[in-house]
Amino acid sequence: MENKVSLKIFKNVFIQLNLIFLSSLVLFYPSLNTFFTHDDFYHLNISNVNTITGFLKFFDLTHSWTGYGHFRPLSDQLLYFVDIKLFNLNPVPLHILSFMVLFSIVIIVYKITLDLTHRRSIALLLAFFYSTSSTNFERLYFLQGLQELVMGVFFFLCAWLFIKYLERRKASSYLFCFCAFVLALFSKETAAVLPIVLLSIYFLEYWESKKTIAFRDLVRIFTPFILTIISYLYLHIFKYGLAQGDSYVWIISPRLINTLVWYALWSFNIPEMLVDYIGPGLHINPNLFRYYSEQIIPILSLFMLLVISILFITVRSYQKYKVTDKKIIIFGMMWFILGLLPVLFLPWHKFTIELTVPLFGLLLTLTVILDKAPRLVMIVIVLLFFVTSVLTNNLTYQTHWIVQGAKTAQRTLNFLNGLGLDSAKVYTVEFYDLPKDKGLPWSPTEQLKTILSDQNFFEVYFPQEINVVYKGTSQLDVGIITIPSRQMLDYQ
């Protein structure tokens, strides 16, 4: 009797979702102790305002008063502002918020999947894959990932409310759906593809119900979304401005296939770092196995087993798929591509962090395919996915610039605080390279400058107290505090 009660408890959706959250928390919990790094200091700097006027400027789409080319007030300036004012530059509350938002996304994608497939097993499996995916690493370790997570929660909420509206035709569902769309746009520009995704949902629903699409109904539903996105894009491009940087180079060419393949591979827990070791073509940098063979070989082996298992199930069960299954599989692939449209033509700006929205589409396709698999085979595939994610997560923690940069920034702050500087005076701090640094691939001083976001780190933590100078070699000027950059990087 007791065993039956125990099994009944574990069949409870609430318990199952909480077990999924626990798996994700165990996998990514070290992110809770990760310090700010890189662009965090720039965003902390521009978010530190002391007037209502300054606060309201965060939401001004007609003018970028900071020169910042990304309009993300809701997921960026607002959250950093709250952290500065309420938590005194403590990153932990923002990391906790990251987990809360991720878990909110997992609940919503569970509900979307359940509404589309009407199968709880598929919805739970997708929720598990999504929450334990190694692509969550950057979103949870790097506080800039909150932009993606906050945008993602409003994106998925908008999609789910749209499905509910199509089912019930209630004005309240439509209104909340539209509000979620606007909030997504105020979180990150990539939400601009939402109307196209909603249109694909619309056609899927009509395709499923075999109803004739009424053109008047189509126009009535989508006109507010289209007018909003046209206004948003006009203001962003011609008034607010676009992002600047070496990686923001749009290239329309067959190269997009390469970008698409990388995002697909990352979705199956291949380490992001491989993009730096493979290419052009299939050329593999021998340093990959020279330095990381112990980690890469098991990951690639498990990945190959995972792919073979999925292909085996696809071929073996093809005749078992209903028309509805095939429609959802196609829809999932469309979602994946549509979600990537904002970054698909940016070959120099591809990161796993961008998979927040697209990942759902690929996992939807995967879980529908796996639903026809024998129980033992499905268990094997789930274990392969999870173990590959664990191994990739561990490797990424050891090598990723986010983790190393956060440690360096924390070390630098502790070192400067330990100097006992007089806050009433203004100091000049010079970071410099040692002669033995000349043989290194990258200058320690240039690395430190990037990690600390140049002057921004000092404007956040030592405003009007420290002027910083980054030099290749120290000039040993009188009155200047000179620090070897390698000391902050913890080089021996």
Image (spheres, rainbow, N blue to C red):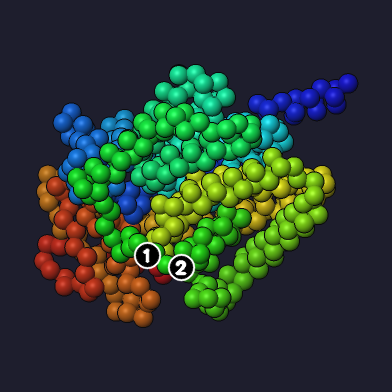
Which residue position holds label 1?
251
Up-down relation of residue 436 to residue 406 (above or below): below
Percent position of residue 40, x then y: 33, 48
Q: Are marks 1 and 2 in contact (CB under 8 Å)?
A: yes
Up-down relation of residue 293 to residue 382 (above or below): below
- The amino acid beneath tag 2 is Arg
Front in this rendered view, residue 176 or 107 = 176
What residue sits 49% from the left and 76% below the top? 280
Front in this rendered view, residue 486 or 443 = 443
Which residue position holds label 2?
255
What residue sits 57% from the left and 32% below the top? 212
What residue sits 75% from the left and 45% below the top? 321
Mark 1 neighbour class, 10 Å CA radius: few under 14, some 14 to 19, many 20 or more = few
307 left or right, relative to 140: right
145 left or right, relative to 169: left
Percent position of residue 272, x then y: 51, 61
Percent position of residue 395, x then y: 56, 60
253 left or right, relative to 129: left
Q: CA distance from mark 1 to mark 2?
A: 8 Å
Q: Quadrant of the C terminus?
A: bottom left
Residue 93 seen by the camera = no
Under tag 2, what secondary structure?
helix
Percent position of residue 244, x then y: 26, 57
Residue 374 seen by the camera = yes
Under tag 1, what secondary structure?
loop
